[in-house]
Amino acid sequence: MRRIAHISDLHFGAEDPLVAEGLLEDLARPLPHLVVVSGDLTQRARKSQFIAARSYLDRITVPQLIVPGNHDIPLYNVVARFTSPLARYRHYITPELHPFYHDEEIAVAGVNTARSDTWKEGRIAHAQIERFRAQFDAVSPRLFKVLVCHHPFIPPAGDKESAVVGRVREALRTLETCHCALILSGHLHLAYNGNVQPHHLEITRSILVAQAGTAISHRRRDEPNAYNRITLDGDTLLLEVRGWDGHQFATTASWNFRRVENGWCE
Ligand SMILES: [Fe+2]
Ligand SMILES: [Fe+2]
């Protein structure tokens, strides 16, 4: 059994201190095996915001896999944005832009989808696709494989406006051949989940996407602060949305999935 806490869009500089403390308390009961952070650790990529994010992450005592988001690249400092976009992220958060975690049950690959040129929209490069292919191919095929990035692979239900990550079809074809089963992302500050197949008809396996809301920032979109708790046990996956109720985090929605030959059934 493995428990993953998927937190996203912390936006230090725009964080709610009460919610931030509540999240640390909730993460401790029970402790996950891995905490995944899917980007936007800061609001404006400022040094003080990265220092605050780093000291917060230091209080989480379990392994962490972290990727940057577009807000972790400077927006207004154009020189820094194009010459050293992730310098502060690499200095304060992690120098590793291709993180990979694996143990006896799970393999989790992180991809940086933040870009200086488009800033808000994200993209996956050919080289990044080849890298996670190699990372997943190097571990036992029995492991449960998870991809983490900031930008979404599928839009929210009924939303035709939100752009999905660039080069999504190519990335998905590789994820399908690698038997990746789950994608964790953020960026939209909306908690939702779904199968990639209705959006990408050429994919023959169902790959589950779980989007996390903003964990602790006040940049909410008509939803409470929330994160995802994912429990993998044999062929079952329990996805719980843990939402802030004003006093603490509690489960606000949950889904049970079961692994079948070509992916998932609910
Ligand atoms: Fe964000
Ligand atoms: Fe973002």
Image (spheres, rainbow, N blue to C red):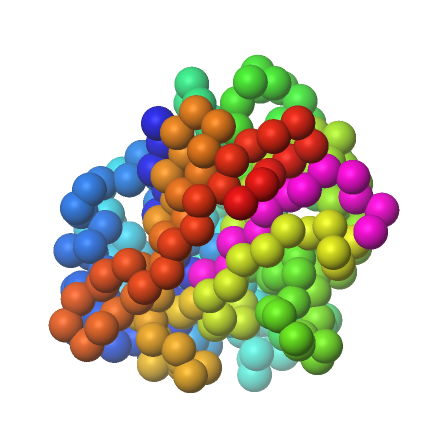
Report the span colored magenta. 201-212
The residue positioned 57% from the left and 78% from the top of the image is 75
Residue 63 visible to an observer of this rendering: no
Whole-percent x, y for residue 189 in the image: 47, 72
Question: In the image, is residue 53 above or below residue 237?
Answer: below
The residue positioned 19% from the left and 76% from the top of the image is 246
Horizontal side of residue 221 vs 218, given as left or right: right
Q: Nearer the viewer, residue 45 or 192?
A: 192
The residue positioned 69% from the left and 52% from the top of the image is 196
Q: Is the magenta stretch mostly helix, strand or loop?
A: loop
Whole-percent x, y for residue 182 in the image: 56, 42
Does the magenta run of residues contain 204? yes
Q: Nearer the viewer, residue 207 or 215?
A: 207
Q: Nearer the viewer, residue 82 or 228?
A: 228
Horizontal side of residue 70 vs 121, given as left or right: left
Q: Quadrant of residue 21?
A: bottom left
Q: Nearer the viewer, residue 68 or 188?
A: 188
Whole-percent x, y for residue 96 in the image: 50, 42
The residue positioned 48% from the left and 55% from the top of the image is 38
Residue 231 visible to an observer of this rendering: yes
